[in-house]
Image (spheres, rainbow, N blue to C red):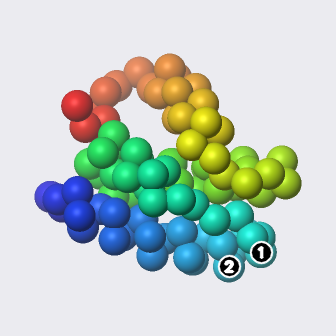
Amino acid sequence: MTNEKERIAILNEKALVLQKELGSETSTSGNIIELIAKRFSDVRVMEGMLAICMAHATLLNKPLTMKIAESILKKILKDVSSNAMIKK
């Protein structure tokens, strides 16, 4: 299991990869990465959440703000039937 510092480093690296893959200028603030790293313990789930947030902002052609990220995560978490992957 990774600690929070490791999860943040993983997400920072993934954010750079996603920027290239999405071909966008969408960047993520440290606060958004920390939010995801604190909420989720599974690396794949974290990366998926980050990808969803960045893709959403890219499609809307808007910067990824904390408000947008929180809204997206809230909607996704409502749909999750099993909380096994969510760090409490």
The quarter holding residue 86 reads: top left
* Quadrant containing the N terminus in the rendered view: bottom left
Which residue occupies 70% across, 64% down?
26
Instruction: Report how far apart the C-alphas of labels 2 and 1 lie in the structure.
Output: 5 Å
Asked where in the image residue 68 lies, by quadrant, the reply is top right
* Residue with the mark numbered 1: 23
Is 65 in front, or is 87? Answer: 65
Residue 74 appears left or right of 53 = left
Q: Secondary structure at mark 1?
A: loop
Residue 87 percent coordinates (x, y):
25, 37
Q: Looking at the image, which is closer to me, 60 or 80?
A: 60
Q: Position of residue 72 (x, y in %)?
A: 60, 35
Dots 2, 1 in contact, CB < 8 A: yes
**Residue 75 sits in which quadrant?**
top right
User: Tag 2: Cα neighbours inside 10 Å, few (<14), some, or many (≥20)?
Assistant: few
| Residue at horizontal 56 percent and vertical 76 percent from the top | 16
Residue 18 locus on image (x, y percent): 61, 70
Element marked by disc 2:
helix
* Residue 20: mark: 2
Instruction: Give amino acid for label 2.
Output: Lys
Which quadrant is the C terminus positioned in?
top left
The residue depicted at 33 percent of the width and 40 percent of the height is: 39
Q: Is residue 1 above or below residue 13?
A: above
Is residue 47 shown above or below 68? below
Residue type, mark 1 in image: Gly
Relative horizontal placement of residue 59, taking residue 21 as reference (left or right): right
Could you say which disc has been placed on residue 59 in the image?
none
Q: Is residue 88 visible?
A: yes
